[in-house]
Image (spheres, rainbow, N blue to C red):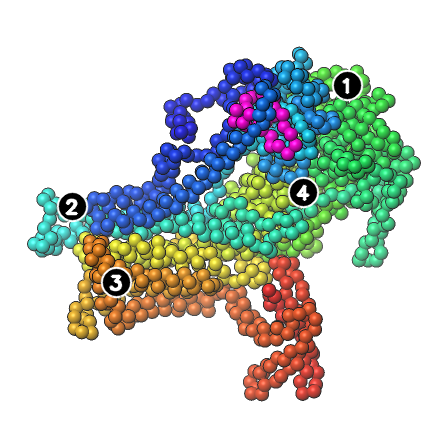
Amino acid sequence: MGTVTSYFGQLCGQEKKKEEERLLRANDRPFNFSYHYANNAIKTSKYNIFTFLPLNLFEQFRRLANAYFLFLFCLQLIPQISSLSWFTTMVPLILVLAITAVKDASDDINRHNSDKQVNNRKVEVLLDGENEKWMTVQVGDIIKLENNQFVTADLLLLSSSEPLNLVYVETAELDGETNLKVKQALTETGEMGDNIQSLASFKGEVRCEPPNNRLDKFKGALTVNQNTFSLDNDKLLLRGCTLRNTEWCFGLVIFGGPDTKLMQNSGKTTFKRTSIDHLMNVLVLSIFGFLASMCSALAIGNAVWEVKDGSTFTVFLPREKGANAALTSFLTFWSYVIVLNTVVPISLYVSVEIIRLGNSFFINWDRKMYYPKNDTPAQARTTTLNEELGQIKYIFSDKTGTLTQNIMAFNKCSINGKAYGKYFCVDNWTWNPLDEVDFSWNQLADPKFIFHDFSLVETVREGNQEANAFFRLLALCHTVMPEEKKEGELFYQAQSPDEGALVTAARNFGFVFRSRTPETITVVEMGQHVTYELLAVLDFNNVRKRMSVIVRGPDGKITLYCKGADTILYERLESSCAKLMNITTRHLNEYAGDGLRTLVLAYKDLDERYMKEWKQRHHLASIAMDGREEQLDELYEEIEKDLVLLGATAVEDKLQDGVPQTIEQLAKADIKIWVLTGDKQETAENIGYSCNMLREEMKEIFVVAANTAEGTPVMSTSCLPQAYALDKSLQMELLRTACMCQTVICCRVTPLQKAQVVQLVKKYKQAITLAIGDGANDVSMIKAAHIGVGISGQEGMQAVLSSDFSFGQFRYLQRLLLVHGRWSYLRMCKFLQYFFYKNFTFTFVHFWYAFFCGFSAQTVYDEWFITLYNLVYTALPVLGLSIFDQDVNDRWSFQYPQLYAPGQLNQYFNKKAFVRCMMHSCYSSIILFFIPWAAMYDTVRDDGKDIADYQSFALLAQTCLIIVVSAQLCLDTHYWTAVNQFFVWGSLAAYFAVTFTMYSNGMFLIFTSIFPFIGTARNSLNQPNVWLTILLASLLCILPVVAFRFIVIQLRPTINDKVRENMRKNQRFYSIDWAFLNCCRSPAHNQGFFKFPPSGRSAERSFLLTCHPVRQEDTHSNEKYMHVHAHAETDGNTHTVCLYIHTHIA
């Protein structure tokens, strides 16, 4: 009842007052109850046993098609209007409603069971020392969690069993990431440990932000004994996490149940609709208008007929009292609305969803898109966008982790103007690395780390101050958490691969990061343990693009260490670094030219007095509830200036396998690929060359780069725009110029700017867009595009969870688009064309019949045929076509990427195609009505008895219709399977079986009023002239279609026609190869005989073949093919026969 109560509460304006700030006290339930905070019970179900039927029906009848057919059913209950029995509409409607209701009920029962299971979990609450159900936990309670337990609610971590008050949590249910996250309690609360008395007497007061869905941010303050401490996300355990590698911990409930961040993120997502969905809605509305016009025309015809001829029939068709031509015409209008209702097919939307579901399964089951290294299959996370994959015009791709592997390796660096990390040239073509550096002198070194420049080790071990400061910065300025499972075996938990690579580099060069607390960082510097007092951490974000730490060394000296993007740090260097900056910039450009990711390092010594005053202001800003971020940013800007440059780092991130080939294939399919990256220009340009986006033949590569909006120039072939280009005054110029380019690369862009670029193209180009990425910084871009694709990479699963499709490697994108996307689009278009064809043909026969029945709204078919036409007789064949059909196989789809172009141009189904479909239906309906009518007119049976009755004509017309629409479907099918064959022949068999059953004597005797066509089937279908009429009507309907298609293929063949013709020729050629393929099955050499009759010769030659099979993997599809080299012997002479067999080996 909660759903109904809340619904009517909203209608009456009784909405819950919006919470602006949360205030709570530990172990004080009466105080917390006064704020009416939600308890920890959750409810994700929509219905209960009483509300299911009314609410579900209400939701279903909000759909226009269902409401329309309910309206038709009501019309059929009026005897003066309906010429059809109520079941012709009610049976299909009930079936559609029942299928949807069963699905909704099943889903909701599962949600009820899940809610019940979660709400009844037990947890130890400190208030009474007993285990309580999760649903009874309240805000302000202190609870105890043990290892491998789920986190009950959003908790403020108070203490834990681990040193330094650390806990390890797995956040897979929140963001899909399986790597452990580290949380750390305040030292002041961690001192309580597991002392129950101290925890029970804890009266801390928390003031924090209201419930929200931001998983990565938390803003609050804890007041204990009149001391206030800042709270952030690192001290919060979120519901949905699991405690790992931690014996126990205690936490204070901040948010419960529906207020938790997990539940706040489970709201409705934006529903994406395809372009075909929008077109279908337009067409359905047009069909409604067309139906109204047909009914109006027939109603007018009825009025004319009543005035001119109606009086003649009043003798045996007496009019009701008060009836006249106008009233009869009005009633006839509504009667024809019922009779012609099949132009608005009730099963259309259900069939579309079934087709999409089937095509989604094909994506999920595709073993050629399975990435075995990470055990990652392809996944269609939505079933509503499959055909949109066949219409993509623009792809927006992240670089790191999407085009590259996101496995970082510290490769080169620049320290105080000197570059380290060398390669030497062996010849003009290859580069070999120097010998690897031996780090055996460092017992804590990572054995997996590889570096190739001995001089850097010598520089560090000699005690060079700049080199030592360089690696000291890398060991101190980060958010990495260490884990030491065994003595000397360090494992770093890094939020990003970049940080892990840099800290590992510092470790190997003698500056080993060992441990951290909220107040200290411990580093082993060249074998000596050194503990630094951590005074402040200036966090990294996508706006600042830098991170800093302020530490006090053992000598009392205070230093700020900073690392970040070169463009950001260069603005904050002191003037004395100008010369060093120029040298470092040259090194950075060299590194970027090699495709390496770079960071600049700098430091600054701070005055004790200034630091003390700054830290006070920092503390006040960190506990502020309003404007905290703005105040902190101002303080960071103030202190991060006049820095001293140390040098720069360069880490390597290699391209994924198959990226250049994939981009080349997609470019051949006329898909525009834009790379959006946060890297610097040189790195982005180098990656562009590496992955074939930029090629040597592109002579004019212009760059958009400016420090002001007025300085933004125009670009030509590729662009690397900055934020100014996205200004409203320049964005159209950016779009116009970029769309003229063959390749577009945007560098230095933030996550928000990525989304803005996507929205710009999406809004003004009216093209289908796809965004692909692997990290949380790509989520906004993925959500902004028509289709979002997530890659399961090194940056967790947030991109995957926000995506519509996901897989393990970028190279699978070409198979998703060129094979599955194209097939899905082709199948959906064929389905719609055929569906509208068969329904319009069915309905137009009624229209022509109206001119022969006095516009009386009499039906031309049997009522049971009308009921079963869409549900039984034609349902399965069209589904078989729409799920299994393919014009060419996947290998030919890769070989000819140009096959993708028609989908981008929306050629297969559009408004013109719909009009052509209507014209085709109109022609077929004329044949299907007038040929049987003419054949049956004044016709007699073989025995001289009359056959020209209404029932025999109805049977003949509907039999012709079934055979013609089945034959049309066979013409449209390019790829036959056993399932297609079964559906087509099975449906025809079902039609005749049902017809003979319903027209039998037995059915008439049992249900006289329901089955009036007694004996019609056996009396009509045993006549040769009836079957001749069926054959004639079928030929007149099908032959013009065949002739028209033949002429079009000869005169104006499409790319599909040309490729299919090539495929047929190659299949004939390969049929020769199959004769000797069996001799090449084993990996060893085989011999076998092959007989080949040369063209134009009568003699048959026999060859003894010795086959040498070699398996080779196709990089596009991962299929394995066999190349065969054979030596042929004939008449004692040996000939070399080179046979190149490219046939798939199972």
Quadrant showing the C terminus: bottom right
* Horizontal side of residue 61 vs 787, given as left or right: left
User: What crowding class fits label 4: few (fewer than 14 Cα within 10 Å), some (14-19), or many (20 or more)?
Assistant: some
Pinpoint residue 856: horizontal percent, then vertical percent. Answer: 19, 53
CA gap between label 4 and label 3 equals 65 Å
Instruction: Point out the frontmost of discs 3 and 1.
Output: 3
Work out whether mark 2 precedes mark 1 in sequence or the reverse, and give the earlier one.
2
Q: Using the image, tell me which numbered label, if any, was put on residue 611.
A: 1
Q: Which residue is at the far front? A: 130
CA gap between label 1 and label 4 equals 38 Å
CA gap between label 2 and label 1 equals 95 Å
Q: Which residue is at the far right? A: 462
Q: Would you say residue 464 sits in the magenta stretch?
A: no
Q: Amino acid at mark 1?
A: Met
CA gap between label 2 and label 4 equals 75 Å
* Horizontal side of residue 811 vs 911, given as left or right: right
CA gap between label 3 and label 1 equals 96 Å
Residue linked to disc 4: 794
Work out whether mark 2 precedes mark 3 in sequence or the reverse, and give the earlier one.
2
Pinpoint residue 744: horizontal percent, then vertical percent. Answer: 63, 47
Stretch of the chain drawn in magenta: 132-156
Q: Using the image, tell me which numbered label, if any, was put on residue 955.
A: 3
Q: Which residue is at the far left? A: 315
Instruction: Point out the frontmost of discs 1 and 4.
Output: 4
Residues marked 2 and 3 touching at CB (< 8 Å): no
